[in-house]
Amino acid sequence: MNNCAIYPGTFDPVSLGHVDVVRRGLRLFDRVVIGVAENPGKHPVFDLDTRVQLVQATFTGEPGVEIVPFSGLLVQLAQQHHASAILRGLRAASDFEYEFQMATMNRRLDSEIETVFVMAREDYTFVSSRFIREIASMGGDVASLVPAPVLPLLKQISTRSG
Ligand code: ADP
């Protein structure tokens, strides 16, 4: 059976930092399943359908990448896809605390699934969906931080907030 990892996230919206994590994942795994979390607790700016469509548009024609929306338990999604690992990205020490808790909890729920971290590319360590949304909403240029399909939607946010 081929080796599969689940890459979960909110992707609100997908950034070039996320794309970099997927590319690194594909060097380690045959398949990367991107799980776009509904995540109502985070009050995403883009709805689930839009976030999924933007990730799909970003990875069109990319062999080895699959995109699925999800709202349940991450380990259940991993089990459904026969994934051996959960893939996450680390930017700075500030990511560690939350990632450590999540990885430990997921290991407790299913000890067979390993969480694997890849380090952000140096020039994307500062890139987060939150900053992208904030900069875009104030009319700043985020073209070098997001995949091309995301840009028109970010322009709408900036028009909405005047
Ligand atoms: P979540 O709400 O699960 O944190 P995100 O979409 O914010 O979802 O992030 C998903 C994953 O991608 C996390 O592991 C996060 O650390 C990682 N990530 C986000 N931006 C970057 C980046 N610029 N470089 C590397 N990893 C990143």
Image (spheres, rainbow, N blue to C red):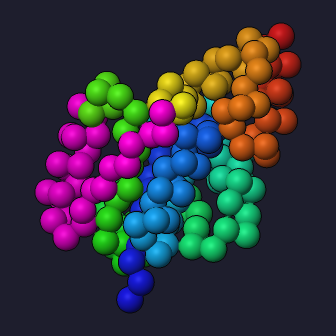
> The C terminus appears in which quarter of the rendering?
top right
Q: Residue furthest front?
A: 122
Looking at the rendered structure, the number of numbered marks drawn on it comes to 0
Magenta-tinted stretch = 97-122
Q: Residue at x 37, y 49 (%)?
A: 118
Q: Position of residue 88 (x, y in %)?
A: 38, 49
Q: Residue at x 31, y 71 (%)?
A: 84
Residue 78 vs residue 57: left or right? Answer: left
Q: Toward which corner of the image does residue 119 lie, by quadrant?
A: top left
Q: Position of residue 102 (x, y in %)?
A: 26, 44
> The N terminus appears in which quarter of the rendering?
bottom left
Residue 64 vs residue 90: left or right? Answer: right
Which residue is nearer to you in this view: 11 or 87? 87
User: Against 15, is 126 above or below?
Assistant: above
Q: Residue at x 73, y 64 (%)?
A: 60
Q: Position of residue 55 (x, y in %)?
A: 66, 53
In this orientation, does residue 103 appear? yes
User: Against 99, is 1 above or below?
Assistant: below
Q: Position of residue 14 (x, y in %)?
A: 62, 43
Q: Toward which corner of the image does residue 145 lie, by quadrant?
A: top right
Asked if residue 138 lies in the magenta stretch, the reply is no
Q: Residue furthest bottom?
A: 1
User: Against 134, is 46 above or below?
Assistant: below
In this orientation, does residue 35 appear? no
User: Against 100, is 142 above or below?
Assistant: above
Asked if residue 102 lies in the magenta stretch, the reply is yes
Residue 62 vs residue 73: left or right? Answer: right
